[in-house]
């Protein structure tokens, strides 16, 4: 597994183990932009399956660092695809709702043509193209709006501001599906076990705007006195443009796994349980 120390990677390693013998690598173990190193290290390990959670995920940062974005999110994926082909191993690769432009009137299906609005989305789309063209046995899992107990995320950003007693201004003209990394990890395991190929969309079910997401976070934490003011993405003025509507249709996942992803509000409840457990001091420590 590449990107094993990332927000999703850490949960995925935990969920796959011990059913699978998992070797977790991150940037210090293998820089996926280095083609030869990737070939050699992967050939030496000789895995049956490669899962790529490694990416340059700073969406605004990609606008000022397009070289790095394409090196990691596109060429890095090609390097892994060629390494997978040589072993041969199956490559499961994580991609994003940001490959779409957000103008659709209905949830995006896997076959909808990508048309990314920002550099992050373009680099991730190029990674998908390289992987498809490589001829490697592969699955692309597109997901969205991730948050998990082991990473910087929107939930924590909202709580930090709320705990400081600040009223919030949150974007209300972008809609998507907040997705708990543990729920996604179980779904990736289902897809892996089902031998699914091609592309599969996976998010928690339902959708909301960032503003509605923030209100639900505060509601679940009982912080009702904090006000959340809706603003437009334009008012926020971030460097990267984001799709207004990035709701992914997950019916392919449901069909192949026979399971339904639970509503995003339920995923959030569980996130708070996990977060609580991880923050409890361990017994015996002084
Ligand atoms: N987060 C989201 O909301 C979201 C939404 C849709 C799709 N996704 C996709 O889901 C996947 C996992 O995302 P995430 O949020 O878990 O990402 P993350 O927390 O940023 O983790 C990415 C990991 O990749 C590592 N990495 C960066 N450059 C690398 C390189 N050249 N070689 C090897 N490893 C490298 C990073 O290491 P360092 O930390 O040391 O740089 C980090 O551990 C990504 O493919 C992402 O595009 C994420």
Image (spheres, rainbow, N blue to C red):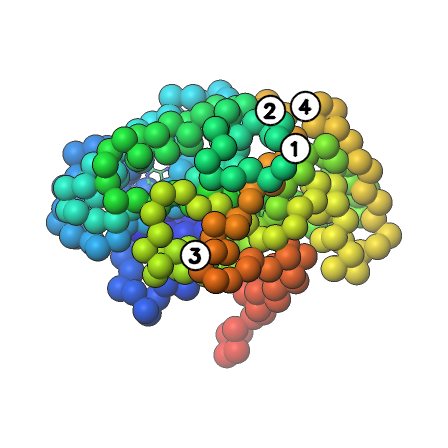
Q: Earlier in the sequence, mark 3 or mark 2?
A: 2
Mark 1 closeness class: few <14, some 14–19, many ≥20 residues within 10 Å: few
Q: Is residue 244 visible?
A: yes
Q: Are marks 2 and 1 in contact (CB under 8 Å)?
A: no
Distance CA(mark 4)–CA(mark 2): 9 Å
Choose the circle earlier in sequence order: 4 or 3: 4
Q: Disc 2 or 1, which lies upstream in sequence?
A: 1
Q: Which mark is residue 166?
A: none
- Which residue is disc 2 drawn over? 241
Rendered location of residue 192, percent (x, y)? 35, 56
Residue where numbered disc 3 is placed: 256
C-alpha span from label 4 to label 3 = 40 Å
Q: CA distance from mark 1 to mark 4?
A: 25 Å
Residue carrying label 1: 105
The quarter of the displayed image where residue 244 is located? top right
What residue lies at 39% left-to-right and 59% top-to-bottom?
189
Q: Tag 2, which secondary structure?
A: loop
Quickly name the residue at label 4. Answer: 237
How far is disc 1 from disc 3 in space, using C-alphas?
Answer: 25 Å
Kindly report the distance in space between the C-alpha atoms of the residues bearing marks 3 and 2.
33 Å
In this view, 6 is above or below 113: below
Q: Residue at x 67, y 38 (%)?
A: 175
Of tags 3 and 2, the one toward the viewer is 3
Q: Position of residue 206 (x, y in %)?
A: 65, 50
Badge 2 crowding class, 10 Å Cα cut-off, few under 14, some 14 to 19, many 20 or more, is some
CB under 8 Å between callouts 4 and 3? no
Q: Nearer the viewer, residue 167 or 46?
A: 46
271 left or right of 195 in image:
right
Camera-near label (4 vs 3) is 3
Q: Nearer the viewer, mark 1 or mark 4?
A: 1
Classify mark 4: helix, strand or loop. loop
């Amino acid at each position: 597994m590449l990107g094993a120390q990332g927000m999703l990677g850490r949960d995925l390693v935990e969920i796959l183990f011990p059913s699978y013998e998992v070797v977790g690598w991150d940037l210090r173990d293998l820089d996926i932009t280095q083609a030869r190193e990737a070939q050699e290290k992967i050939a030496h390990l000789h895995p049956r399956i490669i899962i790529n959670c490694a990416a340059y995920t700073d969406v605004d940062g990609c606008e000022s660092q397009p070289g790095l974005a394409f090196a990691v999110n596109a060429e890095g994926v090609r390097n892994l695809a060629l390494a997978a082909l040589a072993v041969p191993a199956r490559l499961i690769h994580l991609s994003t709702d940001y490959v779409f432009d957000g103008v659709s009137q209905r949830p995006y299906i896997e076959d909808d043509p990508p048309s990314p609005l920002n550099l992050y989305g373009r680099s991730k789309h190029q990674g998908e193209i390289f992987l498809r063209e490589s001829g490697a046995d592969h699955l692309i899992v597109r997901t969205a709006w991730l948050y998990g107990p082991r990473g910087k995320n929107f939930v924590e950003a909202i709580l930090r501001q709320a705990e400081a007693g600040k009223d919030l201004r949150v974007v209300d003209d972008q809609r998507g599906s907040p997705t708990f990394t543990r729920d996604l990890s179980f779904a990736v395991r289902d897809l892996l076990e089902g031998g699914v190929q091609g592309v599969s969309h996976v998010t928690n079910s339902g959708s909301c705007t960032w503003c509605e997401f923030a209100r639900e976070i505060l509601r679940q934490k009982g912080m009702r006195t904090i006000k959340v003011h809706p603003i437009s993405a334009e008012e926020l003025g971030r460097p990267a443009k984001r799709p207004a509507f990035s709701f992914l249709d997950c019916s392919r996942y449901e069909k192949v796994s026979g399971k339904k992803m639970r509503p995003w509000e339920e995923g959030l409840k569980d996130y708070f349980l996990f977060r609580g457990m991880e923050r409890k001091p361990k017994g015996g420590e002084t």
